[in-house]
Structure formats: structure tokens, C-alpha cells
Amino acid sequence: MTETLAAALEREHREIDEGLETYRASRLAGEPDSAALVRAIDGLRRHIYLEEALFFPPLRSAGLVGPVLVMLREHGEMWPLLDGLETEVGRDPGGDTAAGLLDDLVPRLAAHNVKEERILYPQADGVLDGEPAEQLRVFMTTGRMPPGWVCEMARPQPD
Ligand SMILES: [Fe+2]
Ligand SMILES: [Fe+2]
């Protein structure tokens, strides 16, 4: 049986959480696993991309404007934390700055994911059908975020 879109999206949440937890545990053990952190950062950016590019637009068209807006805002709040973590991976991957950024990110991400899983993901398989559903599925399997892409609410605002 084909995995539902909702299940596939939730699976991505868990994989990203596991990467962050692997890093956290390795750091506490004194050997910070930078590769796990980089994978989780890249995985979360890519996940945010596929939500904003392929998942939210059809939800918005189906009338879920408010919930989508809240999710976009939260992506915009998490994005600079990912930028900071990326900097710290190259500078001091086991350091207090990285740990502080992670302490900020993890509860935000947990609260965000719960909302998506309760409110938006249950709509995925009903709202997306045909081409949009196929595009999202294909992206989840093989897609890559365009280099340098920045989530909608973390982009510089025009004056
Ligand atoms: Fe999200
Ligand atoms: Fe998500």
C-alpha cells in the first residue's frame, strides 16, 4: 500500500528529530556528531521548502489560509536558528552557542510539528490529488531544495 502523504510528511518530522537528538546525545558524550547536525539542518530546510512550495499553496486554495500563515511565520522564526547552527557547525560544533541555538530550536520545532500533524497533515490526502499530490510525492523521494532558497518569512523585506 502506498504511504499516505500525511504519513510521509510525519516521517520526515521524525527523521529530522532523530538527527537533532543524535547530535544532542553525541555532544553530551563529548564527541559532537557534526554530520548528524548538518543532515538535520539540511533536512529541515528541505522539509520547509517542500511544505512552502508544494504543500501549503493547495491548502491555502482550499481555504486553510489562517493555519498556513501561522506555519509560515513559525518557519520564518526557525530559519535564522538554522543559519546560526550552520555557522556554529563550522566554528565550534560542540560549543555552548550551538547548544543554545538547539535549545531554542527544538521546542519550537516540536510545537510546530504538533500543529501541522493535527491541523494540516490530516488534510493532505483529501486536498491534494492528481498532479499536486504526485509532485509532492516525487519531491519527497528525490527532490532537492534549490540552492540558496530562503523560506518566505525569512526573506529580506522590500523597503
Ligand atoms: Fe512546517
Ligand atoms: Fe512539517
Image (tube, grey):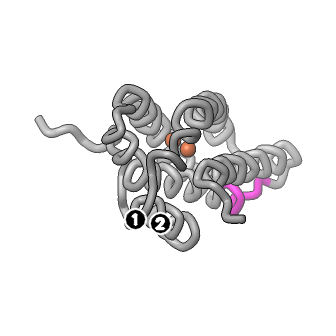
Give residue 131's mark: 1
Q: Is residue 86 left or right of residue 34?
A: left
Q: Is residue 25 above or below residue 115?
A: below
Q: Position of residue 27 (x, y in %)?
A: 79, 47
Q: Is residue 99 left or right of residue 124?
A: right
Q: Position of residue 69 (x, y in %)?
A: 37, 31
Please say if the residues under marks 2 and 1 sit with CB atoms less than 8 Å apart.
Answer: yes
- Per the image, label 2 sits on a secondary structure element best described as helix
In this orientation, does residue 49 appear? yes
Q: Which residues are magenta?
A: 32-37
Q: Position of residue 25 (x, y in %)?
A: 83, 45
Foreground of the two, 93 or 143: 143
Q: Is residue 133 above or below residue 6?
A: below
Foreground of the two, 128 or 113: 128
Q: How many marks?
A: 2
Quarter where residue 98 is shown? top right
Which residue type does callout 1 highlight? Answer: Glu
Q: Position of residue 18 (x, y in %)?
A: 76, 50
Q: Is residue 152 left or right of residue 139?
A: left
Residue tagged by mark 2?
134
Q: Is residue 32 left or right of residue 133?
A: right
Q: How much space separates mark 2 and mark 1, taking CA atoms?
A: 5 Å
Report the residue at 65% width, 35% height from top.
106
Q: Residue furthest right?
A: 29
Q: Residue furthest bottom?
A: 142
For label 2, being within 8 Å of ligand 2 is answered no
Q: Main secondary structure of the magenta part?
A: helix
Magenta run includes residue 149: no
